[in-house]
Image: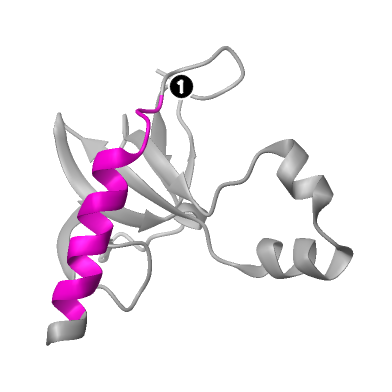
Amino acid sequence: MKSLFSRLALLILVVALAPAAHATADGSDAWRVIDVAPTDVLNARVGPGTDYMVIDALPHNARGVQVEYCVPTVTRDQYFALTNEQQQALNAQASWCLVIWNGLQRGWVNRRFLTEDSF
């Protein structure tokens, strides 16, 4: 139990200190949920990973999802400074994004279930 509280405290600190994501010309302003069965939902968790508890969910067809921040994240220079083995290890990690939907922060979702949306 203490470990869970320590993780939550660390996550809150990281999110609070993280720079806000801003829309750019080369990034999407809206995302939609994909690859979730019509009878299922996309779980939103309190942290970036399946070890964290589910706090909310997005419907299988949610659109207009805003991505606040994704992890892991490295700059281009940092990535190319890694060895090939380190790059492969980083690429093998699941990417998790903190999302907002319908104006409310929902939690962390696995990036593989999001794609760019166009309205």
Picture coordinates of residue 109, whole percent (x, y): 35, 56
Picture coordinates of residue 92, whole percent (x, y): 67, 69
Q: Is residue 9 magenta?
A: yes
Indicate the secondary structure of the residue bearing disc 1: loop
Q: Tell which of 98 and 115 is nearer to you.
A: 98
Task: Name the quadrant of the N terminus.
Answer: bottom left
Q: Residue at x 19, y 57 (%)?
A: 57
Q: Tell which of 23 and 81 is nearer to you.
A: 81
Q: Is residue 112 left or right of residue 57?
A: right
Residue type beneath disc 1: Ser
Picture coordinates of residue 24, whole percent (x, y): 52, 15
Q: Tell which of 27 and 115 is nearer to you.
A: 27
Q: Is residue 73 above or below residue 118?
A: below
Task: Name the quadrant of the C terminus.
Answer: top left
Q: Is residue 41 left or right of residue 91?
A: left
Is residue 34 among what the camera can see? yes
Picture coordinates of residue 9, whole percent (x, y): 18, 63
Q: How is the image coloured?
A: one colour
Q: Residue at x 85, y 62 (%)?
A: 83
Which residue position is annotated with label 1? Answer: 118
Q: Is residue 103 above or below residue 26?
A: below
Q: Is residue 12 left or right of residue 34?
A: left
Tell me the crowding category of disc 1: few under 14, some 14 to 19, or many 20 or more residues within 10 angstroms, Cα based. Answer: few
Q: Quadrant of residue 49?
A: bottom left
Q: Tell which of 58 and 107 is nearer to you.
A: 107
Name the main secondary structure of what is drawn in magenta. helix
How many numbered marks does the figure carry? 1
Segment tinted magenta in the rendering: 4-21
Q: Quadrant of residue 27?
A: top right
Q: Residue at x 87, y 64 (%)?
A: 84
